[in-house]
Image (cartoon, helix red, strand yellow):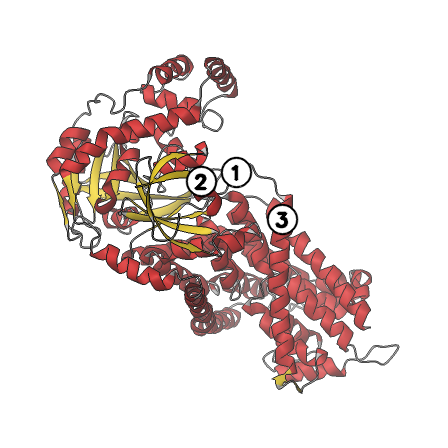
């Protein structure tokens, strides 16, 4: 019997592109989960690792960083993890790509100087053309070095043994690697009296980052800040001096320990690929072809599984109905609960496909290139090079697109991307456009093009224009003192690791279902209630004594949704809408394509798949007083414009709430989009009337 | 610098950018080669010490002061 005490804690750190996640997946396998750091949307990956002898250790995979001097909010996590987070780690597993080892020693020696026990895993040790004498490194850095390969799994067993033995023996701190300069030492000692960090370097870092460091009470912060000001501390000079001193110390040792063949095979191939991929003209063409492929994939490959999910859930619903007695419980479960669940699960294929493809682009090293190429164009609109991926995927579905903004590290650019992506016409708008466009544009050709096709293209076009304009306006409005940088490393191309892709897709799907699922379910229950119930009318009340076991559902027009539709009629009248459209607008909040189903219900059509019948009924609908068709050109265009701009998707609202960590932004987004929709529809209706 | 030219870094003009560049392994004395300009000259791709490539904006690149080798 072993007594399982608190498991030891290992932090995994390293530069971006060092292959950390590959190693993390190898060490933990399926024993991992993704959470969040408080306050920011940075994934916190935690896992459990088996050490043998029934011993386990907890591993946290820290986001990649270059140093302990962060330039974005997200990067601050790294400093907080090593400096202030509790419990303090028992061991730091530092992962470095052997072919770029030298520049990765900076962060390593910084972490070591915070008094942590560190083991260095040299990843990609099987790269040809590299010879290394680990003994020299071990002697110099005073820490164990293990050669591993995330690709083949080489050295992982040895790494585990090393970790287990380090965790079972007490750790004796070494001399600091970098000796603080006299001015820095003075600062460090000043800070130390108030904030007793483990090492001198820890206190110096606290002086650098006192403005945002966590777990320190405000009054202590104030005292420390005043002290620092009095000493005339120059943080940048101190940082530069430290960086140079560290390099000066390890560069000569590296020259002895590591021998690299100039321009290895990977390098030469990367250059050859980059000549095409980063070409000013050809590169853009290649990029848009790739984006087209992604768009097509989400669009086409997801349809099958989505139809399957919908028909499967439809069958489940029928099954439940056949078991349960007719009544509100069956309605609640089938029309509320199961419909809501369907609304969640149905997005999984799109999310999975998008992240599989984005994952591949990221893993092979293409994403960094795309970001650098579109940085300039996107920045004009307050966006980031990475935003273009979100905007393109938004053409299929805004939900995975918004989730893909996670790795935009500048908060303002990320927020703007999230806010404007739903303007791009997604696949859910197509059924609405398809049913309405015939009323707005007559069939026929103009300059050899199908008129209705041109109108459809125009609707997509105004979505893109609205997204860019909104981004530009938001860029001017949102204040941020976070500086924006490009400075991005272009890594050597390498094949994707299937395991990493698997975990990425799994993690994104889970985070959507868990994070947004609850909100979607709640809203769909509310919508179900509004559509199924209405105030009791007199007829029924008089009948109360002989009330049947079977409750009769009120027709849609008399339900709360119907009443709401009628109540908002004065508001939407200037847009040319009547109460029936009002009901459709309200019910469309579940998802835009519900418009079709609502129309079918309103016009009492049994089968909502019979689109041509719905269209016929809509065309026959006349105004009571004037006898003119309800769906004339002005009203239809107004409705089309409204659907192009308005925020009518509870799932998007749920995911925006999750990704921005507050209700503030989804509410602003809702007001902005629906407000614009209202104004634009009004203008169009008044103009065409 | 013209495309294909190789230089040596002397110093940096912007301290914050310098801090970030140095964290990424770009230090004074490092050898830089301008590989290409993109986006109408707004984005630069540099190769550092013949080992790795980095992309930066023109105004970021402008803060790097170089000399001919």
* Residue position marked by numbered label 2 in the rendering: A74
Residue for point 25% across, 42% down = A95
Residue A482's disc is 1
Which badge, 2 or 3, is on the more N-terminal residue? 2
Residue A474: mark? 3
Q: Nearer the viewer, mark 1 or mark 2?
A: 1
Describe the element under mark 2 as helix, strand or loop. Answer: loop
Q: Quadrant of the C terminus of chain A?
A: bottom right
Badge 1 or badge 2: first in the primary sequence = 2
Of labels 2 and 3, the one closer to you:
3
Task: Decide which of tag 1 and tag 3 comes sooner along the chain.
Answer: 3
Neighbour class for label 1 at 10 Å: few (<14), some, many (≥20)? few
Q: Chain of mark 2?
A: A
Rendered location of residue A669, percent (x, y)? 63, 52
Numbered disc 1: what chain? A
What x and y, as percent, mark residue A167? 19, 32
- Eyeballing the image, is A17 above or below A603? above
Q: CA distance from mark 2 to mark 3?
A: 21 Å
**A70 or B26: nearer the viewer:** B26
In this orientation, which residue lies closer to the viewer: A239 or A633? Answer: A239
Task: Identify the mark at residue A83; answer none if there is no mark.
Answer: none
- Residue A681 appears at what percent x and percent y? 74, 65
Q: Nearer the viewer, residue A452 or A232?
A: A232
């Amino acid at each position: 019997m072993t007594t399982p005490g608190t498991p030891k804690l290992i932090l995994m750190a390293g530069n971006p592109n060092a292959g950390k996640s590959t190693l993390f997946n190898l060490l933990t396998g399926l024993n991992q989960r993704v959470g969040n750091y408080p306050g920011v949307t940075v994934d916190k990956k935690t896992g459990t690792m088996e050490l043998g002898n029934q011993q386990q250790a907890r591993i946290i995979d820290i986001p990649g960083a270059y140093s302990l001097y962060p330039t974005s909010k997200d990067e601050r996590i790294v400093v907080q993890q090593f400096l202030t987070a509790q419990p303090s780690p028992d061991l730091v597993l530092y992962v470095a790509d052997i072919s770029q080892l030298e520049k990765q020693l900076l962060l390593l020696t910084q972490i070591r100087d915070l008094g942590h026990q560190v083991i260095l895993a040299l990843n990609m040790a099987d790269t040809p053309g590299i010879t290394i004498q680990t003994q020299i490194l071990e002697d110099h850095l005073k820490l164990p070095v293990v050669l591993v390969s995330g690709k083949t799994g080489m050295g992982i067993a040895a790494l585990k043994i090393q970790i287990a033995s380090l965790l079972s023996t007490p750790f004796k701190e070494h001399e600091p690697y970098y000796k603080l300069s006299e001015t820095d030492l003075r600062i460090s000692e000043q800070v130390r009296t108030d904030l007793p960090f483990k090492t001198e370097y820890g206190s110096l870092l606290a002086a650098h980052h006192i403005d945002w460091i966590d777990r320190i009470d405000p009054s202590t912060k104030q005292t420390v800040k005043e002290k620092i000001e009095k000493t005339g501390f120059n943080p940048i000079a101190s940082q530069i001096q430290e960086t140079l001193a560290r390099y000066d110390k390890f560069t000569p040792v590296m020259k002895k320990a590591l021998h690299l063949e100039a321009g290895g095979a990977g390098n030469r191939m990367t250059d050859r690929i980059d000549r095409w991929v980063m070409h000013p003209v050809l590169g853009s063409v290649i990029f848009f072809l790739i984006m087209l492929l992604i768009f097509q994939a989400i669009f086409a490959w997801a349809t099958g599984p989505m139809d399957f999910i919908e028909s499967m859930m439809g069958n489940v619903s029928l099954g439940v109905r056949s078991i349960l007695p007719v009544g509100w419980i069956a309605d609640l479960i089938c029309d509320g609960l199961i419909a809501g669940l369907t609304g969640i699960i149905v997005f999984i294929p799109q999310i999975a496909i998008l992240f599989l493809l984005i994952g591949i682009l990221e893993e092979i090293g293409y994403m960094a290139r795309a970001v650098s190429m579109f940085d300039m164009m996107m920045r004009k609109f307050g966006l980031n090079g990475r935003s273009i991926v979100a905007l393109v995927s938004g053409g299929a579905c805004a939900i995975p697109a918004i989730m893909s903004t996670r790795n935009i590290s500048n908060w303002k650019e990320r927020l703007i991307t999230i806010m404007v992506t739903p303007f791009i016409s997604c696949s859910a708008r197509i059924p609405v456009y398809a049913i309405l466009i015939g009323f707005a544009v007559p069939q026929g050709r103009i300059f050899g093009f199908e008129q209705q096709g041109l109108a459809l293209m125009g609707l997509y076009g105004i979505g893109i224009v609205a997204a860019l304009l909104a981004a530009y306006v938001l860029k001017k409005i949102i204040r941020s003192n976070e500086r924006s940088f490009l400075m991005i490393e272009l890594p050597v191309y390498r094949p994707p690791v299937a395991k990493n892709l698997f975990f990425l897709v799994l993690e994104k799907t889970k985070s959507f279902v868990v994070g947004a699922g609850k909100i979607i379910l709640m809203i769909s229950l509310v919508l179900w209630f509004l559509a199924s119930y209405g105030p009791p009318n007199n007829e029924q009340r008089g009948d109360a004594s002989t009330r049947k076991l079977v409750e009769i559902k009120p027709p849609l027009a008399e339900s709360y949704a119907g009443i709401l539709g009628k109540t908002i009629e004065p508001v939407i009248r200037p847009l040319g809408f009547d109460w029936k459209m009002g009901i459709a607008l309200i019910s469309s909040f579940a998802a835009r394509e519900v418009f079709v189903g609502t129309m079918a219900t309103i016009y009492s059509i049994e089968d909502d798949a019979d689109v041509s019948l719905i269209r016929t009924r809509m065309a026959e609908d006349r105004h009571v007083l004037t006898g003119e068709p309800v769906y004339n050109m002005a009203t239809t265009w107004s409705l089309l414009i409204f659907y192009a701009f308005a925020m009518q998707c509870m799932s998007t609202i749920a995911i925006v709430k999750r990704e921005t960590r507050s209700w503030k932004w989804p509410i602003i987004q809702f007001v902005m989009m629906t407000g614009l929709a209202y104004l634009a529809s009004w203008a169009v209706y008044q103009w065409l009337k | 610098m013209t495309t294909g030219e190789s230089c040596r870094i002397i110093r940096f003009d912007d301290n914050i950018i310098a801090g970030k560049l140095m964290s990424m392994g770009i230090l004074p004395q490092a050898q830089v080669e301008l590989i290409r300009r993109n986006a109408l000259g707004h984005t630069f791709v540099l190769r550092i010490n013949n080992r790795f490539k980095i992309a930066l904006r023109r105004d970021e690149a402008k803060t790097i002061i170089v000399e001919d080798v």
